[in-house]
Image: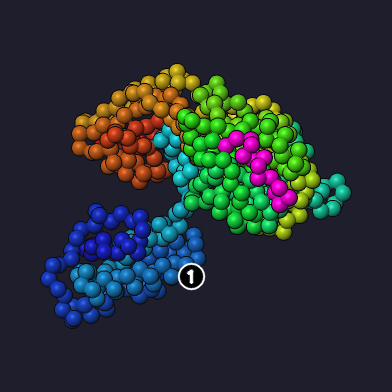
Amino acid sequence: MTVPDFSILRQSVPGVKIDSLPRLCSNEPMSETSQEDLLRQIPAVDHLLQLPRVSQWVERTSRSFVVSEIQALLRDVRDAIRAGRLSDATDSASLEFLLEQRIESRLRPGLVPVINATGVILHTNLGRAPLSVAAQQSLSAIAGQFTNLEYDNETGARSHRDQFLEKSLTEILGCEAATVVNNNAAAVFLILNTLAAGREVVVSRGELVEIGGAFRIPDILARSGALLREVGTTNKTRIEDYAEVIGQNTALILRVHPSNYRILGFTHRPDLGDMLELAHRHQIPLVEDLGSGCLVDLTPYGITDEPIAQKSAAAGVDLICFSGDKLLGGPQAGIIAGARKLIDSIRKNPLIRTYRVEKLIYSALEATLASYRQGRALEEIPTLRMISTPQAELRRRVRSFSSRLRKKLPEGARVQITDGNSVVGGGSCPECNLPTVLLTLESQNKGPQVIASLLRRQKPPIVLRVEEDHALVDLRTVFPDQEAILLSGLVSALR
């Protein structure tokens, strides 16, 4: 059997590797007669449906799906023949092979697990915080079932979605009430739209941040209907600057934690207590956007400037908001907590329906918060466990892994152990570096970018970082049960 060159069809069959097929295309242009002969040799759809492997796909999927894939493939073949790019007969066996590859590619999920060997703990491009085992188990238990999401099991009456999480959040944060929306940007927007539409919001110029994806605090303010009143300068804002602009049209003071950048040197920011005294003296709320959602003291691990949500609530801040999928370590969510009368107003805003979360987010977030309530967050939540892992433990792990890797390395490849830094990432702790231990990969015939590219094509994909022309692996962000897969992938890429 001769197999025609189908490499010209790669565009229509993403992910299919057919480089091993012999190339039978002639450099000579085909005559019109030859093209017609080739077109007549293409098997009919019904004939291909009877082939063994094709009929198996019909049973596994549906006849209509397989027929549509056959028709698409045959269209590509005809186009290739007419364009002079295919100059050999298209026999049934070759088409059966290519169709199988095509269907497998179509059915392969686009969203897949990735091994994060970058050392970036909250890697935005890789989905930020991985969930705890408890959160995963909760998702598994809830996903395929009906739930009491908005149902009171005691009375049989309708309830609100926050009924379970509110209790956990108020207990952990020490506040009166709480609600959950789909991310922190939505939380800020709803607060402003509910409490300040048509009125002024006072914000320091040094806190008019861009929070990622080109979303900026001034833009969110404008869209919410609130009026921005800037005070102070980029590097210095004093309490007097706030006091001078508060008037009858002032709705609230907004304090924003600059999660993703730092201004160092000649700077000043008013004390939280002074801002609270000023706001309450004028009978307006102080709202604090805490950004990353830190609920534990991370100072012992080198993270010294992340505000702890409980401290802001205890100080008397009227409303705080923060992310669920950053330092908190849960699913993507925005949490708003504080005074009950303000939370109730937000719940009555018709727009909250456009930002609400569904049962899976509540389930994963409830399980995540349970780790905090039980005092086991550092042990159970992957984000915090990665942050708190001692460098000595990482060194022991890297030495063991490198020893196993060296035994399987191909000729011309080697690994070295070097000291370096991990980062928190995800727009959190921009000035904090976590000392770590790295593996540097070297190959005589492959550069670091080639190694990185080969690793991304593994199943599952492996993502490392390339710095100063070195391919680096940081085990801080690799789960122990992924090490065997990582080792196999590295050997394959370096071979």
Task: Please state, as top left, top right, bottom left or bottom right, where the C terminus lies in the image.
Answer: top left
Residue 339, percent from left and from top: 76, 41
Name the residue at 41% across, 57% down.
104
* SS at mark 1 in the image: helix
In which quarter of the view is residue 353 placed? bottom right
Residue 233 at least partly seen:
yes
* Amino acid type indicated by mark 1: Ser
Residue that extends furthest to the right in the rendered view of this protein? 155
In which quarter of the view is residue 296 placed? top right
Mark 1 = which residue? 64
Residue 15 against residue 457 in the figure, above or below: below
Q: Is residue 220 magenta?
A: no
Residue numbers of the magenta segment: 237-251
* Residue 472 located left or right of residue 422: left
Q: Is residue 249 magenta?
A: yes
Residue 131 against residue 194 in the figure, above or below: above
